[in-house]
Amino acid sequence: MIASIQTNSKKYKIDLTKPIDISIPLRGSHTNVSAWYVEPPKMEPVKDEDGFSARVSEGAAFNFNNISFNPHAHGTHTECVGYLTRDFNSVNDSLKQFFFLAEVITVAVEKCEDDFVISKKQIQFALGNKKRKAVIIRTIPNTLEKLNKDYAHSNPPYLMEDAAIYLREKGVEHLLVDLPSLDKEKDGGELLAHHAFWNTKGSVRKQATITELIYVQNFIQDGTYFLNLQIAPFENDATPSKPMLYEVITS
Ligand SMILES: N[C@@H](CC(=O)c1ccccc1NC=O)C(=O)O
């Protein structure tokens, strides 16, 4: 199923039967990826007072689970500026288009005092003069640990503020990273890269989104793709999401 797409006055072709999933599955188990000091997600059958459990393997006619989780902490999620604002802003209102010309870039995080960071220079080098609505950052090392790590108190790598400003000024509207946050785990609430990307101190970019805790498998090469950014329709600042890539057909 080949689709022809015209954007930036260029024509591209993609094969809709070959999506590449860059989301992390969310499980009700302690093996689920985790951050921000919360308990693992729960997926449990509804029970009644008589001890009846809505699970087919326990005699019920159907499976009927309650689920509790935190979108920021438990897997691939997409957030809007509502993450930082006093007023309510829903990502379900912010994100109204779902296909974007995207660039996958790989960055080896740099040591900066006690931290590991992604610098403006690295992003600049990787993107060159490419104009993209979405940028997907894969950090290396890129091990399978990213699928089930508990990031609490691990001081994960983060994006420098000037790198976020650079992406904003380049017109990137959707930024995806394989880290639990754009910002330093313990930064006293500064969240510099988030604020810079959404331009909260200027003309706020309400349509811009940040997606965290993706996983870009090693077989996926750096380069140009179409991104299909799908979210669950929660009216909340953040929601679980399923970003999918489509390779551009070159021949
Ligand atoms: N870097 C922030 C902490 C932070 O981002 C955070 C802390 C607890 C629970 C969730 C957090 N962020 C979630 O996306 C700070 O140090 O204030």
Image (cartoon, helix red, strand yellow):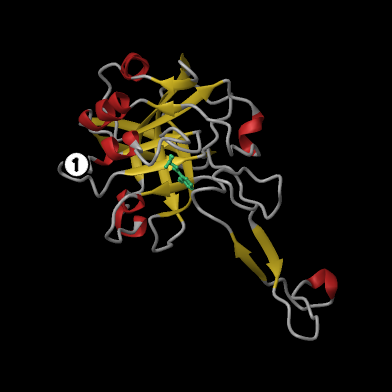
Q: Residue furthest bottom?
A: 50
Return the residue at label 1: 201
Which is nearer the eye, 245 or 105?
105
The quadrant of the picture occupied by the C terminus is top left
Above or below, comparing residue 243 to residue 44 in the picture: above
Above or below, comparing residue 73 to residue 45 in the picture: above
Q: Quadrant of residue 137?
A: top left
Residue at horizontal 37%, vertical 16%? 122
Above or below, comparing residue 237 to residue 180 in the picture: below
Total numbered circles: 1
Which is nearer the eye, 57 or 148?
148
Q: Position of residue 217 (x, y in %)?
A: 58, 29
Is ligand 1 closer than 8 angstroms to the Cβ of mark 1?
A: no
Say which amino acid is labelled 1: Lys
Work out whether residue 54 can be spotted.
yes
Classify residue 238 as left or right of residue 89.
right
Q: Position of residue 205 (x, y in %)?
A: 22, 45
Work out whether residue 222 can be spotted.
no
Q: Quadrant of ligand 1?
A: top left
Residue at horizontal 26%, vertical 48%? 207
Which is nearer the eye, 247 or 205?
205
Q: Quadrant of residue 187?
A: top left
Q: Position of residue 111 (x, y in %)?
A: 48, 15
Q: Residue furthest front?
A: 188
Q: Secondary structure at mark 1?
A: loop
Residue at horizontal 58%, vertical 57%? 69
Q: Position of residue 164 (x, y in %)?
A: 30, 30
Classify residue 46 as left or right of residue 86.
right
Residue at horizontal 25%, vertical 18%? 129
